[in-house]
Structure formats: C-alpha cells, structure tokens
Image (cartoon, rainbow, N blue to C red):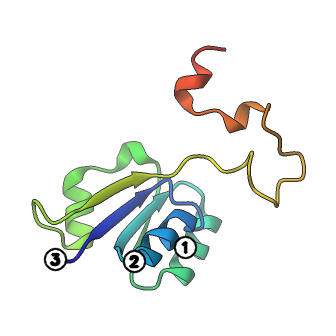
Amino acid sequence: MEHTAIDLFCGAGGLSAGLEMAGFKVLAGNDLFPAAGETFARTHPNARFIPGPIESLSVTDLMAQTGLRRGDLTVLVGGPPCQAYSVYNHQRGMHGKRRLCPIELAYF
C-alpha cells in the first residue's frame, strides 16, 4: 500500500521533503506565499502546488486536483510556522510571538 500525503501551509516544502524521505508520496502542497510555492514546485516535481488561502480549499478541490478517491489519503499535514526557527531569520528567538502556535497566541 502506498502512503500518501498532502502538505497544507507547505512553504518551500521542508515538511514534504521529510515525508518523502520517510517513504510518503506527497501529492500536493498549499500555501499563500507564491515564492514559496515556486520553490515547492521545483523541489517536489511529482507534487502539485495549489496556491491561495487555505479558506478557499475544499476536500472536493483537493481530491480533484490530486486524483484522490475517498480513503486514499494517508496523511494530511499542516506545517507550523518556521520563521522563529529558520537560520535565515537573523532575529529569530524562542521568545518571539512567531514561535507560538495559534492556540498559544490565544493566551496573550
């Protein structure tokens, strides 16, 4: 049985790369940021990049764009924001608001 994944908030595709290394077939990634999508598309040529806000996606859209049938998807993931952890963010830190998940932000 083939293990499949769709990566929401995929960014450039770091989580997708890990899934592929673990043996998953990444079918698609979605992100709002077009430049990240260009990187995702180049580094994951067998996956489809679906641009736009997550609110505009539906299960029907994802199934149509990936060719999935009911019961075919193994994992639906949503990547956490990486701005606080990325080595490319020279102002990163463990105490910044960007390191928090939305649930934690509700407490501030």
Could you tell me if the residues under marks 3 and 1 are in contact, i.e. CB atoms within 8 Å?
Answer: no
Q: Is residue 103 above or below residue 38?
A: above
Q: Is residue 63 above or below residue 89?
A: below
Disc 1 designates what residue?
40
Whichever of callouts 1 and 2 sits on the residue coming sooner in the sequence is 1
Neighbourhood count class around disc 1 (C-alpha, 10 Å): few under 14, some 14–19, many 20 upward: many
Whichever of callouts 2 and 3 sits on the residue coming sooner in the sequence is 3
Q: Secondary structure at mark 1?
A: helix
Identify the residue at horizontal 61%, vertical 46% (top origin): 81
Q: Secondary structure at mark 3?
A: loop
Quick check: 90 left or right of 101?
right
Could you tell me if the residues under marks 1 and 2 are in contact, i.e. CB atoms within 8 Å?
Answer: yes
Check disc 1 and give the amino acid type.
Phe
- Residue most extreme to the left: 70
Quick check: 70 left or right of 37?
left
Disc 3 designates what residue?
1
Q: Position of residue 18 (x, y in %)?
A: 50, 69
| Badge count | 3
Q: Position of residue 44 (x, y in %)?
A: 48, 80
Between marks 3 and 1, how big is the CA–CA gap?
25 Å
